[in-house]
Image (cartoon, rainbow, N blue to C red):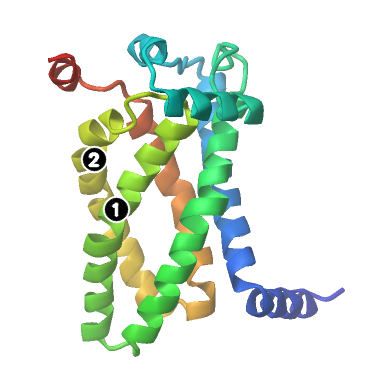
């Protein structure tokens, strides 16, 4: 089969099932980025263990969080088997990133860019800058919050807002430095049908940054505030 025919079939599939395609592609790149991060840690012998203070939170839980944790346990989403020891992949974490990418971020981005392209039509510099600012300052803040909160839920944490409160501003500041130039090229050059796919490829690099930000422990200052 020729390359042109493969590309034609791929384009046809995208047009027939845009939501499915966007969700699968975004979830694949998201999970792949986390897999790359873990592979890097294995090669260079870095350990990524769960913070002990976060595990203590399991001891005092409300019934709802107990049910959520049991549900996550059945799905194999909890870090309970020392899966991040050196030389091992954390399959539970990979599952969490796959779920977030396929079922949360992918559909959200698909709907968002579809609306954005319909509401702000054209490729003039004015339209591109409007879409750039709207995307970065309207979508990105809640998407960052959804990321940390949904991850905390899948990790079975009782205090699902703590990590979001501690890491939100640093993550948003970093996202501005990365995504503003990336999205400028996206809105200026990329066809609407390939919008989420382009973001997915860029997300492969971004998620490695996000993985690092998420792996950093909650600051001592924030922990003290929580205790008080």
Q: In screen coordinates, is 148 left or right of 95?
A: left
Point 35% across, 89% down: residue: 121
Point 60% across, 24% down: residue: 73
Point 40% across, 31% down: residue: 152
Q: Which residue is mark 1?
A: 142
| Label 1: few (<14), some (14–19) or many (≥20) C-alpha neighbours in 10 Å | few
Residue in front for this viewpoint, 74 or 113: 74
- On the image, the x and y values in percent for residue 212 come to 37, 32
Point 39% across, 18% down: residue: 61
Residue lying at the far right of the rendered structure: 1
Q: Quadrant of the C terminus?
A: top left
Q: Earlier in the sequence, mark 1 or mark 2?
A: 1
Query: Toward which corner of the image does residue 109 lie, by quadrant?
Result: bottom left
| Label 2: few (<14), some (14–19) or many (≥20) C-alpha neighbours in 10 Å | some
Residue in front for this viewpoint, 23 or 133: 23
Q: Is residue 40 visible?
A: no
Q: Which residue is mark 2?
A: 168
Q: In screen coordinates, is 201 left or right of 57?
A: right
- Does 128 sit above or below residue 112? below
Q: Which mark is residue 210?
A: none
- On the image, the x and y values in percent for residue 137 come to 21, 61
Element at badge 2? helix
Q: Is residue 148 visible?
A: yes
Residue in front for this viewpoint, 178 or 162: 162
Spatial CA distance of label 1 from label 2 is 10 Å
Residue lying at the far front of the rendered structure: 63
């Amino acid at each position: 089969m020729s390359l042109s025919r493969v590309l034609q079939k791929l384009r046809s599939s995208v047009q027939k099932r845009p939501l499915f395609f966007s969700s699968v592609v975004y979830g694949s790149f998201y999970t792949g980025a986390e897999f790359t991060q873990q592979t890097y840690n294995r090669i260079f012998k870095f350990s990524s263990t769960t913070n002990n203070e976060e595990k203590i939170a399991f001891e005092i839980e409300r019934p709802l969080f107990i049910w959520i944790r049991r549900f996550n346990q059945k799905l194999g989403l909890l870090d309970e088997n020392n899966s991040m020891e050196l030389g091992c992949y954390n399959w539970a974490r990979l599952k969490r990133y796959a779920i977030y990418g396929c079922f949360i971020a992918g559909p959200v981005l698909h709907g968002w860019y579809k609306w954005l392209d319909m509401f702000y039509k054209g490729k003039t510099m004015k339209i591109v800058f409007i879409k750039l600012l709207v995307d970065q300052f309207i979508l990105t803040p809640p998407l960052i919050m959804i990321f940390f909160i949904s991850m905390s839920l899948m990790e079975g944490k009782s205090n699902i807002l703590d990590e979001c409160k501690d890491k939100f501003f640093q993550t948003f500041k970093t996202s501005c430095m990365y995504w503003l130039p990336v999205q400028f090229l996206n809105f200026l050059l990329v066809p609407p049908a390939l919008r989420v796919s382009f973001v997915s490829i860029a997300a492969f690099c971004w998620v490695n940054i996000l993985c690092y930000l998420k792996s950093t422990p909650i600051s001592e200052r924030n922990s003290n505030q929580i205790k008080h």
